[in-house]
Image (cartoon, helix red, strand yellow):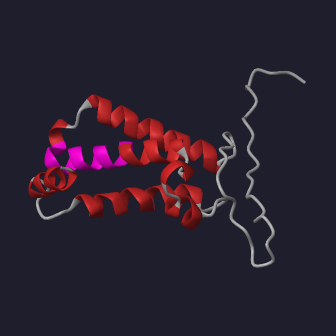
Amino acid sequence: PKAIRIEALNQQLDGTTVEEIEKDAKVEMETYLRVKFNTTAIFSAVGENRHRDIVRIMIDLVLYYVSLRISPKQVQETRLTQYNKGIKWLKEVRDGDLTPDLPKYMTEDNETKPSSFRFTSKQPPHDMFF
């Protein structure tokens, strides 16, 4: 059963529990999402109402943190790759490059919170003539 496997895993984590690692992963995800999205609604969804990318990234982050805690010098390349892909997705969502169907953060007036934006530019090449 699941409870036995989690208990066995908890014994390998030097006092940290899987539940604590899940909380750490959730907090990390929230730091990227809360700018535009209702993280309470996102993380309280259950069953089929959970966004598949959120679930996948949560799993990837938790597995990465578990691997890191069990054997910090021998984290599998796959775990690190999946962790980095998850963080990349979160950054792209935060920056507006991806637009998943997630509940938006609403103000007290039931208005969508204005999204933040950034002005960026690239330096023109020095050998360019105008």
Side (left or right) of 107 relative to 61: right
Picture quarter with the C terminus: top right
Give the quarter of the image for residue 17. bottom left
Which residue lies at the image location 68% right of the left edge and 65% below the top edge? 105
Instruction: Tell how many labels.
Output: 0
* Outermost residue toward the right in this view: 130
In the image, residue 78 lies at what x, y percent?
31, 30
Is residue 65 part of the magenta span, yes or no? Answer: yes
Q: Is residue 128 above or below residue 106?
A: above
Res. 76 image quadrant: top left
Q: Nearer the viewer, residue 106 or 84?
A: 106
Q: Residue at x 73, y 25 (%)?
A: 125
Q: Main secondary structure of the magenta part?
A: helix
Magenta-span inclusion, residue 69 = yes
Write the residue at 75% across / 40% down: 121
**Side of 44 relative to 124 (left or right):** left
In the foreground, 103 or 60: 103
Q: Position of residue 32 (x, y in %)?
A: 55, 55
In-image side of 45 versus 94 (left or right): left
Q: Which residues are magenta?
A: 60-72
Name above or below for residue 89 compared with residue 116: above
**Vertical comparison of 23 with 93: above or below:** below
User: Of residues 19 and 45, which is closer to you in this image?
Assistant: 45
Residue at image coords 53%, 51%: 50
Above or below — where is 31 with respect to 84? below
Instruction: Single out the residue that lies furthest toward the bottom.
Output: 108
